[in-house]
Amino acid sequence: MSAEARGYIRDKSGMAARRKRITSTLVFNAIILLASIVFLFPLAWIFITSMKDQVDILKHPMAIIPTEFMFVENMKEVLRRAPWDVFYKNTIIVAVGVLVAQLCISIPAAFAFSNFKFKFQSFFYLFVLARLLVSPESLLLPNYLIINGLNLYNTLLGIALPSFASAISIIIFRGAFMEIPTALKDSARIDGCGDFRYMMVIGIPMIKSRIIAFSITSLVYQWDSYFWPMVITESVQKRTLAVGMAYFGTQAESASEWGLTMAAAILVILPLLIALVFFQRQLVASFVTSGIK
């Protein structure tokens, strides 16, 4: 075969490979775009509905452009009907307090499971794993009785206390600590680094991505938590945002004020959306490096 023929075949095969890559990229981008539309449609509909008044919603429920933009008026009415500043304060206190407690408990526990050998170690770790098999709903009554017995009913501490110990965080951090090379720990010990100092100075910085990933999921979970805060509180001054939405619904002047309800929903989810926009890169990087799906 001549050199020209071989060059022609290589050019044809290269063009075919490029066309295949371009086609694959286009198909992948089309799938991503379709999935994005599906996931973002409810959020977009919330924003559209929050801009309408009740009459416009009932007359033109499928209209994308409102007859009259009522977002500012709806938001003013939402803020008037409920103490959202109290709900925000309570939610931030509970979410941040739970996260700090979880990290303070789970990181040392995970470090102990991954670096020490002690009696009944396997049994205690199986006990942690078994916690994942217990649904939160089955613990509702025992938690209620314990919190009520501690005189913590209708308190922010009563909302947060059952979430202080997290089995999943112990498992995640244990796996992260075990991935640290043993030679690094041996070198630290030769240099006179104790276990606590090794955990604080070397261990925690090396599992930072796992900590960030878990922190994000914990904050979002506590921000959206509804059932337990509703059960354990009765005062409006102790309610969180998710329960505050239900309280706002009881203040409705008619059966279905969808415009006001959607405006209130925006008020609840807005901090999460802002955090997603500003910390998107850190969020993706933390989940990718931590291996959490």
Image: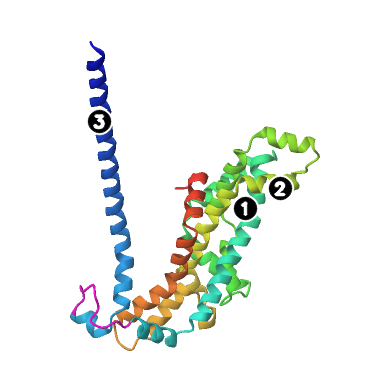
Q: Which mark is residue 201?
A: 2
Query: Quick one: label 2, few (<14), some, or many (20+) residues within 10 Å?
Result: few
Considering only order in the chain, which callout, 3 or 2, is on the residue closer to the N terminus?
3
Q: Nearer the viewer, mark 1 or mark 3?
A: 3
Q: Nearer the viewer, residue 181 or 244?
A: 181
Q: In the picture shown, does residue 95 fall above or below 171?
A: below
Q: Can you see residue 149?
A: yes
| Colouring of the image | rainbow
* Residue assigned mark 3: 15
* Residue assigned mark 1: 106
- Residue 258, position as x, y percentages in the image: 30, 79
Provide the major secondary structure of the magenta segment.
loop
Name the kind of residue labelled 1 in the image: Ser
- Residue 170, position as x, y percentages in the image: 59, 49
> Do the residues bearing badges 2 and 1 touch, measured as CB atoms within 8 Å?
no
Instruction: Tell me if residue 66 is in the magenta stretch.
Output: yes
| Separation of marks 2 and 1 at Cα, in angstroms | 17 Å
Quarter of the rendering containing residue 148: bottom right
Name the kind of residue labelled 2 in the image: Val
Name the kind of residue labelled 3 in the image: Met
Q: Nearer the viewer, residue 126 or 117?
A: 117
Q: Give the magenta range.
A: 60-70
| Residue at x 68% of width, y 40% of height | 115
| Residue at x 49% of width, y 69% of height | 228
Q: Can you see residue 235?
A: no
- Residue 50, position as x, y percentages in the image: 32, 77
- Residue 285, position as x, y percentages in the image: 50, 49
| Separation of marks 1 and 3 at Cα, in angstroms | 54 Å
The quadrant of the rendering that contains the N terminus is top left
